[in-house]
Every structure is written in structure tokens, then in C-alpha cells.
Amino acid sequence: MNRAATGTFQTAPPRAALLAILGCLVACATLACCGEQAASSLDPAAEKAALLKRDHEWQIAVAEKKDAAKIASFFTADGIMFGSGEATVAGREALTKSVADLVAGPAFKDEWTWSRVELSPDGRLAYLIGTTNITTYDASGHPVTNHARLVNVWRKDPDGVWRCIVDAWVDPPAADTAAGAHATAGAANP
């Protein structure tokens, strides 16, 4: 309604109001339909399978310990990695250097399993929760295996390739560490 200069109200012609409402309803229905089509074209099982295949390729690259740049290429350009008590490593160049340092040692080993894989509704982001057994070195250069909880966040980039945004492992709760699930010093070489 419009207020006229005289202080009285004027109503819009009923036909114009109905056309405006009808236009809004058509626009809303079109947006809702397009959104449903995008969501309905997503096959969550196939997307999870593609993500887990990519993650398996990453595990193979890590196990081979040959090419730090290849291993780091599984991260986004702005990806980050950190473990319990360790500094955060961010960006492809820093990740490549950190990975090279990790895999250089003969005892390095990183094996992980996933217990949960979840996709965003649009299928462009995912998080994975699981556990890892990662053997690195302590300050004295001795191998130490950390049995940790693991969280990864992945993004499907515009080129259709899944890449890891965040790779983080944390120590289990104190009750688990008391049971011997934390670190085992002197792990054997693979």
C-alpha cells in the first residue's frame, strides 16, 4: 500500500498485486527446482567412493616414500597439516618440505583407516574421521609410533579432483594413553 500526500491509503490494483505475487512464486519455484536438481544429481555413494579412491592413492604415495611433491599434491594449495604437539604446516611449498623431511627417515610410516566419511549436501566438501599409526622421530632421533585420532577435510576442486584441506592427528584421551594406545618408543624399521 502507498500512503498518499493526503494521509489516506491507496491500494494497488488487484491484478497488478496478483501478478507480482505470481511472479515471486514462479521465481521461488524455479530456484527450488534448480536446487533440487543439483542435489538430486549428486550420487553420495559414488562421490564417497571417488573420495576414498583418491585417499587410497594418497596412502600408496605415502607408503612408497619416493616423491614428496606428489604426496603434497594431494593437498589444496592452501592446505594445512598438524599433529599433536607439532607446528602447523601450511601451503604447498611448506607441505612439500615437511613431507620430504618426514619420509626421509627409514622408520617413517603412516597408515590410516577411516571410520566415518561425510559429504556436504552439495558434494563439494567432506570430512573423514579415523585413526592413524604414524611413526616419526623424537628429539633424539629415535623412532616413535603415535597411535592417534585423525581428521581430514577434503574439497572437490573446480577441476573435479578431491584434495585435502586439513590433515590433523591428535593424541587419544588420557584414559586411552594409559592403556598403552599413545606412543611406542623404539618402533621397528619397516
Image (cartoon, rainbow, N blue to C red):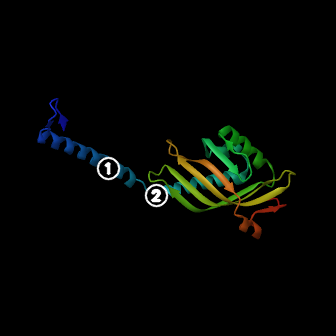
| Circle count | 2
Mark 2, Cα crowd under 10 Å, few <14 / some 14-19 / many 20+, is some
Q: Which circle marks residue 44 in the picture?
A: 2
Residue 85 in the figure: left or right of residue 57: right
The residue under the point 71% across, 44% down is 68
Residue 143 position, x and y percent, is: 82, 56
Query: Where does the image place residue 97, in percent across and percent down from the top left?
Result: 73, 41
Percent from the top left, x then y, of residue 23?
A: 22, 42
Return the residue found at the far bottom.
Answer: 179
Image quadrant holding the N terminus, namely top left
- The residue tagged 1 is 32
Relative to residue 43, is residue 86 drawn left or right?
right
Contact (Cβ within 8 Å) of mark 1 with mark 2: no
Report which quarter residue 51 is drawn in.
bottom right
Q: Which mark is residue 75?
A: none
Give the residue type at disc 1.
Ala
Residue positioned 59% across, 48% down in the render: 164
Residue at image point 69% right, 56% down: 170
Q: Which callout, 1 or 2, points to the residue nearer the camera?
A: 1
The residue nearer to you, when weighing 190 against 142, is: 142
Task: Give amino acid for label 2.
Answer: Pro
